[in-house]
Image (cartoon, coloured by chain):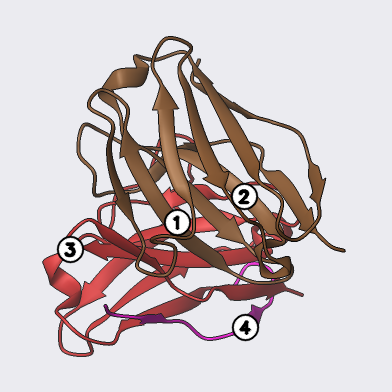
Chain colours: A brown, B red
Amino acid sequence: EVQLVQSGAEVKKPGESLILSCKASGYTFTRYWIGWVRQMPGKGLEWVGIIYPGYSHTRYSPSFQGQVTISADTSISAAYLQWSSLKASDTAMYYCARVRGDGYNGDFDFWGQGTLVTVSS
Amino acid sequence: NFMLTQPHSVSESPGKTVTISCTRSSGSIASNYVQWYQQRPGSSPTTVIYEDNQRPSGVPDRFSASIDSSSNSASLTISGLKTEDEAEYFCQSYESIIWVFGGGTKLTVL
């Protein structure tokens, strides 16, 4: 059974750093693209970017390029979303999700449960 | 990059049929597959349609979708509405490995 289990909720101050994790199981981690999606409170879904863990190839939304870093650790089948300096506007629910099939374009067929990030002074 | 525009909300009665549109701002809607996600409050999204009109296993055939090149839009149709269909629905497509989500449509079944 494919599962994506995300790390727990975070409360941070502006300027702090943060790494969210997404632990995958039930499939060959290196053979599927995995992505991140932001959902600000009461708002819609925003595509952050994706990574192919097998080669660490990444693609970012222009809106998030330079603001976050996506990485993966194939030894433990985990993907990460990282900030070096958080802003209050980063407050949102963040989901990781697996891309269906062997390509980078398609849909997300399995989702994590989401991690709520709150950034407040 | 292009945008996908959806109506903010739609409502319909149980047993009826509703259609949600998703209009692409630039580039052809037919050039890349369109997906549709359902998100119930407090839950992660799930796919109800992928690759324009494919239903994942477990999604009832009350859900269908199509592409209309003349209006450069995609549509999700839900027939025989049930109260459990009340949710937010998002369309999604891509171009050059950049994915775009529509703003979402809140479906109320009343």
What percent of the width, then of the height, locates residue B71?
Answer: 23, 90
Q: Disc 4 or disc 2, which is closer to the eye?
A: 2
Q: Chain of mark 1?
A: A
Same chain assignment for discs 3 and 4: yes
Same chain assignment for discs 3 and 2: no
Q: Chain of mark 3?
A: B
Total numbered labels:
4
Query: Is residue B38 shown above or below A88?
Result: above
What amino acid does circle 2 point to?
Answer: Tyr
What percent of the width, then of the height, locates residue B82?
Answer: 67, 59
User: Mark 1 near mark 2, Cβ–Cβ under 8 Å?
Assistant: yes
Farthest residue, direction right: A121
Same chain assignment for discs 3 and 1: no
Residue B102 included in the magenta stretch of the image = no
Q: Is residue B26 left or right of residue B103?
A: left
Report how far apart the C-alphas of labels 3 and 1 lie in the structure.
19 Å
- Indicate the quadrant where residue A98 lies: top left
Report how far apart the C-alphas of labels 3 and 2 lie in the structure.
25 Å
Residue for badge 1? A48
Residue for badge 4? B9
Residue for badge 2? A94
Answer few, some or many: residues within 10 Å of disc 4's Cα (few below 14, many 20 plus, some between 14 and 19): few
Query: Is residue B3 shown above or below B83?
Result: below
User: Mark 3 near mark 2, Cβ–Cβ under 8 Å?
Assistant: no
Answer few, some or many: residues within 10 Å of disc 3's Cα (few below 14, many 20 plus, some between 14 and 19): some
Q: Disc 3 or disc 2, which is closer to the eye?
A: 2
Residue for badge 3? B32
